[in-house]
Image (spheres, rainbow, N blue to C red):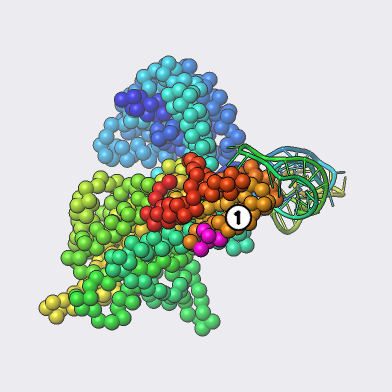
Amino acid sequence: MENQNLQNKRHTLAHLLASAVLEIYPDTKNTIGPAIDDGFYYDFEFSSPIGDKDLAQIENKMRKMLPKWLEFSHEEKTKEGSSEYFKTNPYKLELINEIAEKGEKITFYTCGDFTDLCRGGHSENPSKEINTDSFKLDRVAGAYWRGDEKNKMLTRIYGLAFNTREELDAYINQREEARKRDHKKIGRELGLFTFSELVGSGLPLWTPKGTIMRELLNDYVWELRKSRGYQKVCIPHITKKDLYETSGHWAKYADDLFKIETREGHLYAMKPMNCPHHTQIFACEPRSYRDMPQRYAETTMVYRDEQSGELSGLSRVLSITQDDAHVFCRENQIETESLAIWDIIEKFYSAFGFELQVRFSTHDPMQREKYLGTDEMWTKAENALENLMKTKGVTWLDGTGEAAFYGPKIDFIAHDSLGRVLQVATIQLDFNQPKNFGLVCTNERGEKEQVVMIHAAIMGSIERFMSTMIEHTAGNFPTWLAPVQVSIVPVRENHNDKAKEIYEALKREDVRVELEDDNNSLGKRINHAKAQKVPYVIVLGDKELESGNLTVESRTDKQEINLEDFILKLKEEIKNKSLN
RNA sequence: GCCGUUGUAGCUUAGUGGUAAAGCACCAUAUUGGUAAUAUGGAGAGCGUGAGUUCAAUCCUCACCAACGGCUCCA
């Protein structure tokens, strides 16, 4: 109930915001304004644009008005009465009509001098309950009326609101802290990837260090897949448009494809996904039920012409490296194969201490035209996935309308440092593409039997996985993944030879090691290694030469250990993919 | 794509209508240092790009590009 109380305050503040805005800008049309997780917002149509610098004035107005907000009164109105009240506000009129059509009550709430069409849920006495310094207008953003991009774009004002000033400050601080973990910042500091304005936005370029990590991650996924009977395949990055006409992608995503016209005038496209290509490998020879399932894996880049405003660091790019796999199987193999994929996902993410949420992404029956195939297919596929989740005993988030156009999905959700939702791993069940491509196997009775496709990605995309993993670890990668695993810092120049010896010894063991033997001071070189988040720093001086042991500093402790033991320990840690 | 904010050396930032300042990083010299950064010196940007206004623009105007926060989208 405490929480409800806070939600009421936030909702009340949305009203207060609208009231202040209307007072300062009388020709503004106010629309809707709910409470949200960290505060509230309200959407307006302004007669002339406003920006962040106008927020202070509005906020001051709100503070000035608040003491006069003693209590809310409410009143039920007729459709005619309420329409009359909002006759110059088309947004409110639209809402009123809808409420009336549904036969629900139309209620108006008033506090201070401000009356709004509203369902209720406010503070009893705003002036007493809300501290003037427990809220803050945060930023101006655009938002389409009713979330539909065909509608007019309104101006949304976001506010932060908590019970106390302290909680508000704590939240703002925490947000600042989260920004320090931003993968774009850490990626630059650790030298993992870069962007070039000449190459273009959404097209990350991977440095040697970043590339090491990409390959290690991919090797790990492959290791898990290989033991479960997957085979690698390889396809070109372009195709004739015919492939996508057959798969159904052309009809749905033609605008989002990078297209290429040949000198002879034929139309090709960069591949935006791999499934259609993979179907053609499956289809290249007749398949017996004895050969099923066929499991194809390929890590490869796909290219999507996303809208520029959607791009964001590594989490949303134009060139996406998918760790893709397609299992072609019979219906009675769906469960076993899907559970095997789920297994891989659990194993893989446990190497990072990740907790993923499960989302059941189903089709939206209200928008049937967005999806291929028959209702029977969808019911069958969705039931199969639901049973899978029940078998696993997980709770899932509702993802109605989040299905792919060819089938439902189980999506695995991570969050970025600011709490934004990112889909990473996915298991998708597809009856439609096998049908469109006529994919069959010959069954026990000699009949052609349509096969099923399971689409599976473990990281989803290496770019997106890296973004969330970097933010999760703040760049403190586990030893097996760290681009530099050990840094050796000789104390003085006359320790360089011995340092070099150890460096070579570690190199021979395939340890990724660096020697910090430049002309900088000892403190500076150690600092440099630590700033690069190297898991182990070896400091080598007279003390170590005498004792024959190494001083090894990890991120959390310091120990004396001899070289052989250290190598054993490292290898063990790398082999087990230990978290540290 | 739409709304808002931002764009000064590799990075982080200062600054002004009269052609730019600092720290870190880099290079050189000295220093051989036992753990949050040795000292001195040097080089490095014409201020995102283009056009316009002006005697004069990095600072004003417009367009474009890019980044960030939202909205929409995400096979």
Q: Within the magenta stretch, is there residue A507?
A: yes
Q: Is residue A180 left or right of residue A252?
A: right
Residue lying at the far front of the rendered structure: A546
Give the labeled residue for mark 1: A498
- What residue is at 47 percent from the left and 52 percent from the top? A566
Observer able to see residue A3 = yes
Observer able to see residue A364 = no
- What residue is at 26 percent from the left and 60 percent from the top? A340
* Crowding at mark 1 (Cα within 10 Å: few <14, some 14-19, many 20+): some
Residue B36 in the image: state x and y as whole percent. 62, 37
Q: Main secondary structure of the magenta part?
A: helix
The answer to whether A192 is drawn above or below residue A560 in the figure is below
Chain ID of residue with mark 1: A
Residue A336 in the image: state x and y as whole percent. 21, 62
- What residue is at 56 percent from the left and 32 percent from the top? A55
- What residue is at 16 percent from the left and 76 percent from the top? A443
> How many discs appear?
1
For this rendering, which residue is in front, A257 or A216?
A216
For this rendering, which residue is in front, A204 or A528?
A528
Where is residue A208, by image quadrant? bottom right
Residue A111 in the image: state x and y as whole percent. 42, 21
Where is residue A330, by image quadrant? bottom left
Q: Which residues are magenta?
A: A504-508
Where is residue A425, by image quadrant? bottom left
Residue lying at the far bottom of the rendered structure: A264
Q: Is residue A569 left or right of residue A200?
A: left
Q: Within the magenta stretch, is there residue A257?
A: no
Say which amino acid is labelled 1. Answer: Lys
Residue A548 in the image: state x and y as whole percent. 54, 49
Which image quarter is the N terminus of chain A in? Answer: top left
